[in-house]
């Protein structure tokens, strides 16, 4: 990981830690949902109808 990426990660974690717990939980839920959606999308074969 380069220095810019490290700095960005530290900035995000610092901001996250300052949020109220309810907002932290909301963000975690969104992140988990996005992770599930991307995993599901990658696992699915191409579903276009055959011509």
Image: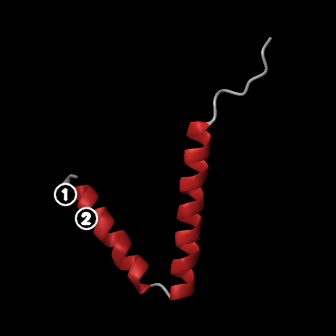
From this view, report whether residue 50 is shown above or below residue 18. Answer: above
Give the alpha-carbon distance from disc 1 to disc 2, as whole Å: 6 Å
- The residue singled out by tag 1 in the image is 3
Which residue lies at the image location 55% right of the left edge and 78% below the top edge?
25
Outermost residue, bottom side? 20
**Foreground: 8 or 35?**
35
10 Å crowding of disc 1: few (<14), some (14-19), many (20+): few
| Residue 50 image offset from top left, x and y in percent | 78, 15
* Residues marked 1 and 2 touching at CB (< 8 Å): yes
Disc tally is 2
Residue 32 lies left or right of residue 7; in this view the side is right
Residue 34 lies in what quarter of the image?
bottom right
Give SS at disc 1.
helix
How would you rate the neighbour count of disc 2 (Cα within 10 Å): few for under 14, some for 14-19, many for 20 or more? Answer: few
Residue corresponding to mark 2: 7
Residue drawn 52% across the image and 71% down it = 28
Question: With respect to residue 32, does 22 lie above or below?
Answer: below
Toward the top, the furthest residue is 51
Q: Position of residue 30 (x, y in %)?
A: 58, 65
Tell me the SS state at disc 2: helix
Q: Note whether 49 is above or below 4 in the view shown.
A: above
Q: Quadrant of the C terminus?
A: top right
Which residue is depicted at the point 55% across and 62% down?
A: 32
Q: Residue at x 58, y 38 (%)?
A: 43
């Amino acid at each position: 990981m380069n220095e810019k990426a490290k700095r960005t990660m530290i900035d995000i974690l610092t901001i996250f830690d300052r949020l109220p717990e309810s907002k932290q939980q909301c963000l975690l839920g969104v992140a988990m949902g996005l992770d599930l959606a991307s995993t599901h999308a990658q696992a699915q074969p191409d579903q276009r109808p055959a011509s």
